Amino acid sequence: MPLYIHVLACAFGLGSWVSINGLWVELPLIVNVLPEGWDLPSYLTVIIQLANFGPLLVTLAHKFCPGRLRENLVICAVLSIGVVACVLLAVFWKNTTMFLGQPRSTAFFILTFFLALVDCTSSVTFLPFMMQLPAKYITTYFIGEGLSGLVPGLVALAQGVGMSKCVNVSHVLDNITDSEPPNFTVETQYLPPNFSTEIFFSFLAVMTAISLGAFIILNRLPRTFELSTENLVPDSDAVATVCSGFEGPVDPNPKTNSEEEEEKKQIKVLFPKPLHSGYQLAFIYFMVVWVNGATNGLLPSVQTFSCMPYGNMAYHLSAALSAVANPVACIIAMFFPKRSLVFLGILCLLGSAFGGYNMAMAAMSPCPLLQDTPLGDAIIVLSWIFFTGLLSYVKVMVGVILRDRSHSALVWCGAAVQAGSLLGSIIMFPLVNIYHLFQSGDICNTTCPL
């Protein structure tokens, strides 16, 4: 296996979710500038869910026009859109327009939609393209996909948060006399980060361009490996596809029906179909809906309210390190897979407990527990890390269990993922933006009871 193909496969996987992950870890700086303020994450969760019409179109094209969709052209198009959107975001992300009498971040929302469209569509196009390569390179692709969350998180940590401080600002009124003292108010002043948000978005554009370049090179490689054992059997027989890699070359002599039946029986013995009762399957799909609803809709919508009262540093660390926790959990699941439903249920319960703490602190905003203490800052950051990491492990292992069961089980898994994410976003959007159940505050001017 040439090393450079592994590098290309890793770089290609890097472009799968780097844009949205990067956008999310940059929110601690963006919410201080855009007019939506602390409500901004709830808007983004809905926009990201709307972008799922991209993979829906690809799925419908595969269903009604099988074999006619050229995935290489789709991948090239979406990655090109991603590069252009990141460049435009670096230029226009601050621009606002008046809508219903209020300033709105229209340019930011539109460009975020296109970035989400790119990343959501990658889920149904990148991996099918990688299936053209030998299976050995798919693991490298998944490593790159994990890095799409790790790299932006590390860069955001290096960027810094722009520490805030409270300053006295004097206001002189027009009708004030010379004998009266000026009026002083306390305001929050944010120090600049190590490098600007524009540079960070430019970095995302470079990462997406690297992924596009890696794809172009991979697509032009000679297909000397197309006759691998994975392609010697029809796709409809998944068990035979798996077994073909272990049985050696195909016997040119045809077999009788009795020999074929005997061989099928041996295959069923060697690779038994995972058996789950109806209650177990219901529990598995419930975990899929709940985990994705919590991680993609419920909690991200209120991350600002749970973290910002502890300071901009706590919010920045929570956003960046929780983004890092996702690929780390996937790597742990790769080397230490545990399929016990009891074990996964316990992890799901623990992750939900951390999520419940995060939601409780958001509901108590702007005066959560242990505010203005190092212990409170550490607890909220660790709570977000463990919430993301534990539920990410559960997501991976549940996907592995359903993948081994059948293709239709994976189809229903995908439907449950989207249903949970959409349900979480729909629930939180009116609570945050219409009923205003979560209150924002100013660190320097908010007075909390002791």
Image: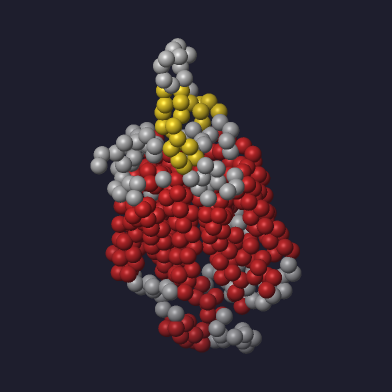
245 sits to left or right of 448: right
- Residue 8 shows in this picture: yes
Q: Where is residue 236 in the image (x, y as percent from the top left)?
A: 53, 69
The residue depicted at 34 percent of the width and 44 percent of the height is: 362
15 relative to 223, above or below: above
72 sits to left or right of 138: right
| Rendered-image quadrant of the C terminus | top left
102 relative to 9, above or below: above
Q: Where is residue 217 in the image (x, y as percent from the top left)?
A: 72, 63
The residue depicted at 45 percent of the width and 53 percent of the height is: 317
**Residue at the limit of the structure toward the left, as seen here:** 450
For residue 386, what is the image quadrant? bottom left
- Residue 416 shows in this picture: no
Display coloring: secondary structure
Q: Where is residue 32 in the image (x, y as percent from the top left)?
A: 49, 38
The residue depicted at 67 percent of the width and 65 percent of the height is: 8
